[in-house]
Image (cartoon, rainbow, N blue to C red):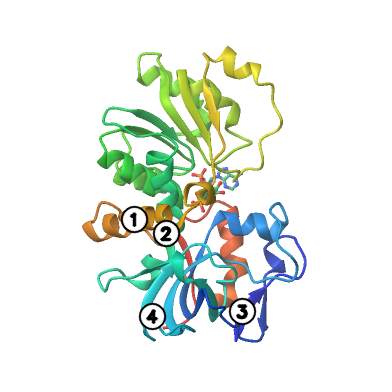
Amino acid sequence: MKAIQITQHGGPDVLTVVETADPTPQDHQVLVEVLYAGVNYIDTYFREGIYHSELPFIPGKEGCGRVIHDPRGEIADGTVVAWASAEGSYAEKVCVDRARLVAVPDSISPEVAASMLLQGMTAHYLLYGVRDTQQGDSMLVTAGAGGVGLLLTQLAHAQGATVYSVVSTDEKEELAYAAGATEVFRYSEGLAETVRRRNAGRGVDVVYDGVGKDTFQESLESVRPRGLVCLFGAASGPVEPFDPQLLNKHGSIFLTRPSLGAYTATDDEFRMRAQAVVRAVEEGTLDIRVHEPYALDDASRAHHDLQSRSTTGSVVLKVAD
Ligand code: NDP
């Protein structure tokens, strides 16, 4: 089969097209023919070696495809499924854990299905796992027009929250407003100052910061006393070590650095979040915006564009029709 392989860590150029043997599913897995693979920021951390995976490896955790072999004979060949935690989804075939896939309804297109779960479940646990979002809550979301950012904004808006979204371009500003953001502004405006000007100096109940290094200090300054800073990513790089006394200084604030893995730790929790996402997509509460699909062979361009901030919404590789 054709696949994208990484034999050494580095920039987007280390994503190489290869011919390799088909994977063999174990009893708890099914073999899937990939239609679209989801491209996520976490894939760039594995590519760079910030997160560890034994070399060589095929990147990609997420996708949508057709089941072509179930060793237990439980899932019919041709069933269209989506997943978010398989190893090696940038390939024509991948093995997926049977407990960690969902059936894709006809009403959801394969490219949307390929990008709904990882970012959708992340938005879900950030709003309903890390805390329990209520109507009237206020939040600041960095990278508000990115994959996670747009979904988080839509779900929070549907819940009746006030969302302050931070983006870098006019096009992204438009998308963030369309997703339901209450106010959209730029990083250069000063996050804390801008938020406080808009809510009578109080600060927001929670900051969702997926940008990391460049925005973290401002995130601490934007939250209200006893509010929560949820640092969930590092698109601009990892946050430097810091003095916990800062949490006291900013008003006894809380800090968490969560992961999707910890919030889908059991199969039941995975199913609950995955089904909530599928339902929200079907009902239209979540409108997944997929950036123009890249060919599998163009995986390195997809990574380059994602890391140079030129994509909006979710990114996918088209693998087969
Ligand atoms: P995005 O589509 O949001 O892409 C990243 C965005 O970050 C860019 O579009 C850009 O938006 C913004 N950004 C700000 N500064 C930089 C910079 N210096 N370099 C690159 N991008 C920058 O990606 P994802 O939706 O896939 O992921 C968003 C974040 O969420 C990532 O940090 C990712 O690791 C994290 N994540 C965490 C999970 C968890 O469970 N903890 C699960 C899933 C994702 P703009 O130009 O508007 O600033």
Disc 4 secondary structure class: loop
Q: For mark 1, what is the residue?
A: 277
Q: Which residue is mark 4?
A: 75
Looking at the rendered image, the quarter that the N terminus falls into is: bottom right
The residue tagged 3 is: 3
Gap between marks 2 and 1 measured at Cα: 7 Å
Residue under label 2: 117
How far across and how far down the image is residue 90, in percent? 57, 72
Q: CA distance from mark 2 to mark 3?
A: 22 Å
**Which callout, 2 or 1, points at the residue further toward the start of the chain?**
2
The structure residue drawn at horizontal position 30% and vertical position 46%, both measured from the top left corner, is: 178
Q: Which residue sits furthest right?
A: 8
Residue 150 seen: yes
Q: Earlier in the sequence, mark 1 or mark 3?
A: 3
Residue 292 visible to an observer of this rendering: no
> Which residue is depicted at the point 69% across and 21% down?
243
In this rendering, position of residue 96 left or right of residue 153:
right
Distance from mark 4 CB to nearest ligand 1 atom below 8 Å: no
SS for dot 3: strand
For the residues bearing labels 2 and 1, Cβ distance under 8 angstroms: yes
Mark 1 residue element: helix
In the image, residue 106 above or below residue 306: below
Q: Determine which quarter of the picture holds residue 248.
A: top right
Residue 289 image-quadrant placement:
bottom left
Mark 4 vs 1, N-terminal side: 4
Q: CB atoms at circles 1 and 3 under 8 Å apart?
A: no
Q: Nearer the viewer, residue 295 or 27?
A: 27
**Lower sequence index among marks 4 and 2:** 4
